[in-house]
Amino acid sequence: MEPVYINTAKMLKAMSDPKRLRIVDMLSCGELCGCKILEEFHITQPTLSHDMKVLSEAGIVKQRREGKNIYYSLNTDALSAMHRTLGHMFEDKPDCICHRPEQKELEGNGVNHTKLYVLTGFLGSGKTTVLLELCRRLEGHRIGIIQNELGKISIDGTILRNDDIQMVELNRGSIFCSCLKLNFVKALAEMAQQDFEYLFVESSGWGDPSNVHELINAAKELSQKEYDFGGVICFVDAVNFPEQIKELETAQRQLKHCNLAVITKTDLVDESSVEKVRMLVRDMNPVCEILTSCMGDMDYSFMKKDLTVFQWTSDEESTNTAETKPKTLILEYDGEAEEEKLDRFLEIMAPDTYRMKGFCKLKGRGWTQVDVVGSRIDQKPGEEFACSQLVLISRIGSQIIRPIFAEWEKTVGIPMRLKN
């Protein structure tokens, strides 16, 4: 499909909601603070944030932050281009599409087969970052996502959520474990009926994909439709992988059963460290393709290849069981926490956790997406929620509960709730 149709359709879809159309009309008179827009509607701040995000991503609205306030204005260049496109479309002209020779337009990547990729990689290895970039590059294509989280709430699902993408979330376990694999097979079978061009499965960081082909074949039997399987892509954290591979069988299995290994976070280590990780990958899987990635920037030409030819070993029983699943907890608090105090709490808890992630409201910063892997704490602006939520994946099982309460009281000092 030509880009002009894709871009115009995206803008029209964003404005197809009456509320958003009224917002555009309000902004036609000039820049407005988000608080002024909110006064005109009986909606919550999160709802307005979602609407403005849709308008911004469609290129209709621009935004800037001044202190705690966000100001919005129309992207007049983009709107003028859309106006010209629509005007041209409704005219009879020599180059009109109806005057072109009749031709069969080939959509997608094959005949009635959805291209399926399974993304694995240990906790915090960068799967979601690359998946966001893949979705951006495939804008205008029909895309489905099956997103899997260990915990009860889906942090990555919130990040990936998009009006143009159909997503199924499978939480509270691994899709390769007996506790969820039947639901996973059903989800694959149901998604096969949607005739997507691409389906991406983002497994949890604890997922052991050793039985992935067995589950895909089961979905085929259930749906009577076959996927064009693109392969298993394993994301390898250049910073933490050398330690993970020593102690975690899950990390070893993820690499052993992949067709492509992507070494991520290469901007955080030197070239010799990247080469060391590359050698560790090759020791574990002698045949898989190997690429490097920095913040989602990588060579995406792999999508034109048949990665399945780089298969090192056959299916085996997954190590994912209810017994081997790590303890996952959700910490919630109302109001605002001081950034320095929260950072101190995260630093103290980091050695006893595989990962911590969530959305927290901080004094002076507002809503912030928090991500902790190893000793590294990353923060960036995040979406607003009813309360702050932080997921902790424990290295020491339930023994982590008492230290969480003690250190939170000692360092952060505001009321909180801890849930399974």
Image (tube, grey):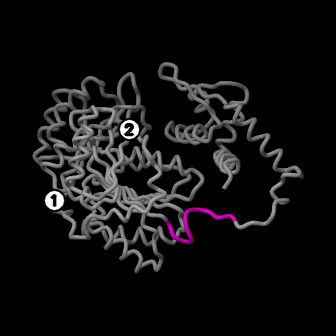
Name the residue rendered at 26%, 70% in the picture. Answer: 314
| Residue on which disc 2 sits | 294
Name the residue rendered at 37%, 71% in the picture. Answer: 216
Tell me the crowding category of disc 1: few under 14, some 14 to 19, or many 20 or more residues within 10 angstroms, Cα based: few
Residue 24 pos. (x, y %)? 68, 36
Residue 206 pos. (x, y %)? 24, 54
**Which stretch appears magenta?**
105-114
Q: Is residue 149 visible?
A: no
| Residue on which disc 1 sits | 324
**What amino acid is at disc 2?**
Cys
**What amino acid is at disc 1?**
Thr
Q: Which is nearer the eye, 331 or 199?
A: 199
Q: Which mark is residue 410?
A: none
The answer for how far apart the CA atoms under marks 2 and 1 are is: 31 Å
Q: Is residue 73 visible?
A: yes
Residue 50 pos. (x, y %)? 53, 41
Residue 100 pos. (x, y %)? 82, 60
Task: Left or right? Give the position of 407 relative to 333.
Answer: left
Main SS of the magenta part reads: loop
Q: Which is nearer the eye, 284 or 69?
A: 284
Sooner in the amino-acid sequence: mark 2 or mark 1: 2
